[in-house]
Image (cartoon, coloured by chain):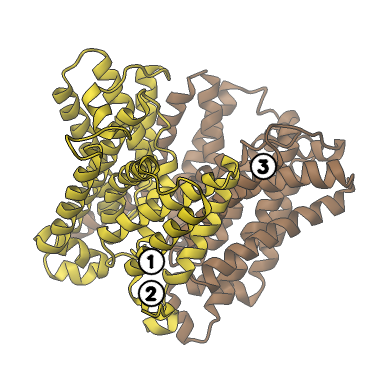
Chain colours: A yellow, B brown
Amino acid sequence: MKLDPKVLARHPTLGALVIAVLLHLAGTILIDGYSSPFSMRAMLVLAALLAVASIGQTLVVIIGGIDLSIPFVIGFANVVAAQLTGQGVNFVVVCIIVSALAFLIGALNGALAAWLKIHPLIVTLGIGTMAQGAVLIWTRGFPSGSAPTFVSDFVSIGGSMGPIPLPGLIPAAILLALAITLLMSRTPYGRRVYALGGNPLAARYALIKPIVMWAMTFALSAWFAALAGVLLLGFTGSAYGDVGQPYLFQTLAAVVVGGTSLLGGRGSYWGTLIGAVVLIEINTLLIGLGLQPSMVQAALGAIIIILVSLYGREPHLRTTI
Amino acid sequence: MLKRFSSTIAATALLVLLLVVNIWLNPGRFAPASWGALIGLASPLLCAALAATPPILGGRGGIDVSIGPLMGFANAVLVTGLIGRLEVTSPPLVFAAALALGGAIGFINGLVAAVVRIQPIIATLGAYLVLTGLTVTIVPAPTGSIPEWLRSLSQSFSFVPVLLIALLWWAFTRLPIYGQLMAAGSDDRAAYTAGVNVTAARLVSYILAGAFAGVAALSLTALIGSADPNVGPTYTLLAISSIALGGVSLAGGRGGLIGAAIGALDIFLLQSVLTFFNVSTFVLQVAYGAILVAAVAFTPLQDLMMARRARR
């Protein structure tokens, strides 16, 4: 198959997939043990964590918004879950409390942005800052506690499910991806999200309620961010309020590398999933090549720009008239 | 005229209120004799907010989130490279270097965002990562020292960086390209069909952002007195919050540097009030988030209530 750049430009998800495969081949050739079972499992777990955190960003971007509160909600859920578990609260109750709070934060984000037509970037930034600050006040900046062992086992790189040498997170993430894809392509909710993102005015004439839809979508986004926060608690072992910080850029990058346009109305969660794999491949490759963390960061920034310029460019203005 | 500034009214009212509270709480710090040091404290954020504004005015998601890291990068390069290694300390040369370095990086941002047409937030987040990474590589820990004249930019001559940006911007608004940028920001398709070179206008807005960030870096350097890899990046979110607070539409085409400056002063004065009460940084964070949301919600809420009253 000849890889014409124009084909990739029309099918950005395919482009991301090709890049992921090429990156993996490059890693296998350049770095000893890159395709070893342990390294593969580590990459899968990291990619799955990023993929979960990026679900919300994908939905929010498709509806035409952006969610900067994801890193704050991840940190918020991470600390609240650890703190409550540490105080001996039943884990089911912990999950209910964290879910309810996350839904509330997200719904507030979406409703305020859609009702008052404030840019979601500012609303999510403000609300996210407040949520994280509130948790810091509550814990006085020193969160304690840890995740129940079954959460740690669920996300552990060395974990296994019976005969399958993979932690439960991997199949769960794949099932989740299927569910999200069904939600977006086969339910009225999903079609309404695409309709609102594609053309808000036309969506109004189709009797789609923007405020309700935005509140629901941002609530989902916050909930998945909270889920990622709890999973990260199991992954790192202890609570850390800033654990979500890298995810601000990474969720956005996963969405865009996966071919979803930040202008809304186009894209898919499959793309984001592949985008998450691409990001983790790049990261692993750079660390494997022996770069310092700061240089890994710099190279990651440059590589993402180059990747997106290959197949994620915006159309020229003259084509939109 | 009133309509044009209505979105800045909330921020201006907040500014007056915060000024009164600050002067009442802390007359010594706000006395005319200490204005130099006071402006020096506020200046890096003020300059950062001014720097982040031009790309936003250009519309279609235009934004430069690399402003903060660019300030940090320029701070590191100027202090360790230009002043430390090359021992260039003459004020005109240092100012020229700051403007050129910032403008060059702004040019790259503009190429990626406006010419290659990668969504600006991704393009400049990429630059954010690159600049942060490079800064930490050049200057792993705070180091270096600065000449006395540069230090005075945070004391008696603290008005110079802001004044320089204001003059540059004023000169820019005299040029036709300013009108073209605003036209592109309010409706880029209409502007394009009317023959405006939208790409060029947006490219220039990123160059301006970079050059202003270079000036902001001088102000920051004067304040901290060394090269520090950790300070710069924090300014990005503060600058963008300032702009939103000041009533500049993130959709582009509306507002200007005055709104951004008022928003930045609001945030600075708010921090000043809260630190006077010695509250923890956590409370500061919550208050800051709340004020941000409340301030940006104020104008649309007012419009909604006015519309409702008109219907009755």
Q: Which mark is residue A269?
A: none
- In the rendered image, which residue does mark 3 sit on? B137
Image coords of residue A117 (percent x, y): 31, 56
Three-letter code for the amino acid on which mark 2 is drawn: Leu
Q: Secondary structure at mark 2?
A: helix
10 Å neighbourhood of mark 2: few (<14), some, or many (≥20)? Answer: some
Q: Nearer the viewer, mark 1 or mark 2?
A: 1
Residue B246 visible in this rendered orientation of the protein: no
Residue depicted at 32% across the width and 17% down the height: A145
Three-letter code for the amino acid on which mark 3 is drawn: Thr
- In the rendered image, which residue does mark 1 sit on? A18
Image coords of residue B102 (percent x, y): 69, 56
Badges 1 and 3, same chain: no
Residue depicted at 19% across the width and 35% down the height: A161
- Quarter of the image with the C terminus of chain B is bottom left
How many marks overall? 3
Q: What distance separates the C-alpha of mark 3 from that of mark 2?
A: 35 Å
